[in-house]
Image: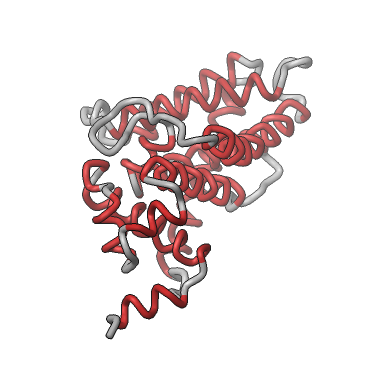
């Protein structure tokens, strides 16, 4: 007689099995790092057969790509959750803080999303089949939110006219990604508050370089920090319901 787990697996749809596998792989990545992402360990955590990884996804590279896509989808949701205000610079900094928060919640996932981590270490993740297109689509969904916010900033009149929002988005993305990566690597241990002492002045310098004033840039980033703190307190006081 088949075990209850096997019977439950048979009743699952392909989408449900993939969801289980991606959930399990994401959790294992957070708890144990890339070396533990193996077909057998992920399937066991997902309570499905090892063959499910190959049958429903094609293999381990495809599973990793699905995890990466999930990561960028969550990043887009985090960007969208930043409370909108009438200060586009504050909203941009809110996006930067949301990116940092997601990275700190699962550093290995963040590394994997940006091609730094694989199962056995930190190196470029090879695309799975045509997975690079899927990764690009998931990335672009999050990136387009950043570009839209940069367009608001350009339209505010606080910086030089004629600036390209996508170029600004690339500069901001590089700034935040560099900060997050260095912070995750422990390179800011000498700073009691890396956000205040490193990220905030770096972004002020970037905004001023685009034509904003020091006073306006600093005021916007302080406002963003306050809004982020309020949102974090609200989330801690009212955690999401578990299904």
On the image, the x and y values in percent for residue 91 come to 61, 40
Q: Where 99 falls versus 218 (above or below)?
A: below
Total labels drawn = 0
Percent of width and height locating residue 150: 67, 30
Asked whether, in this view, residue 215 is left or right of residue 100, the answer is right
Based on the displayed image, in which of its 4 quarters is residue 109 positioned? top left
Q: Is residue 96 left or right of residue 150?
A: left
Colour setting: secondary structure
Task: Name the residue nearer the viewer: 223 or 15.
Answer: 15
Give the percent coordinates (x, y) of residue 235.
46, 63
Relative to the observer, which residue lies in front, 73 or 69?
A: 69
User: Which corner quadrant of the image does residue 167 belong to?
Assistant: top right
Q: Can residue 138 be seen?
A: yes
Compared with 98, 202 (above or below) is above
Task: Name the residue at the front extreme.
Answer: 1
Q: Quadrant of the C terminus?
A: bottom left
Residue at left offset 32%, top offset 33%: 117
**Is 3 left or right of 10, judged from the image as shown?**
left
Residue appearing at x 43%, y 55% in the figure = 55
The answer to whether one can see residue 90 in this image is no
Residue found 70% across the figure and 24% down from its top: 165
Q: In which quadrant will I find the N terminus?
A: bottom left
Q: Nearer the viewer, residue 106 or 157?
A: 106
Residue 92 location, x and y as percent?
59, 36
């Amino acid at each position: 007689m088949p075990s209850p787990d096997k019977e439950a697996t048979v009743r699952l749809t392909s989408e449900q099995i993939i969801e289980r596998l991606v959930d399990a792989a994401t959790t294992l990545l957070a708890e144990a790092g890339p070396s533990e992402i193996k077909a057998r360990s992920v399937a066991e955590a997902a309570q499905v057969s090892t063959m499910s990884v190959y049958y429903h996804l094609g293999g381990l590279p495809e599973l990793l790509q699905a995890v990466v896509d999930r990561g960028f989808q969550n990043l887009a949701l985090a960007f969208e959750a930043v409370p909108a205000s009438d200060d586009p610079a504050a909203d941009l900094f809110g996006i930067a803080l949301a990116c940092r928060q997601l990275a700190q919640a699962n550093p290995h996932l963040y590394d994997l999303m940006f091609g730094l981590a694989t199962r056995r270490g930190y190196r470029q993740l090879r695309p799975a089949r045509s997975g690079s297109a899927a990764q690009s689509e998931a990335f672009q969904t999050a990136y387009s939110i950043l570009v839209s916010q940069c367009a608001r900033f350009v339209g505010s009149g606080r910086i030089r006219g004629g600036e390209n929002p996508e170029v600004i988005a690339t500069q901001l993305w590089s700034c935040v990604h560099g900060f997050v990566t260095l912070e995750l690597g422990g390179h800011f241990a000498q700073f009691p508050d890396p956000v205040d002492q490193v990220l905030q002045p770096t972004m002020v310098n970037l905004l001023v370089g685009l034509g904003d004033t020091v006073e306006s840039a600093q005021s916007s980033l302080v406002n963003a920090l306050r809004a982020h703190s309020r949102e974090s307190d609200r989330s801690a006081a009212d955690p999401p319901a578990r299904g």
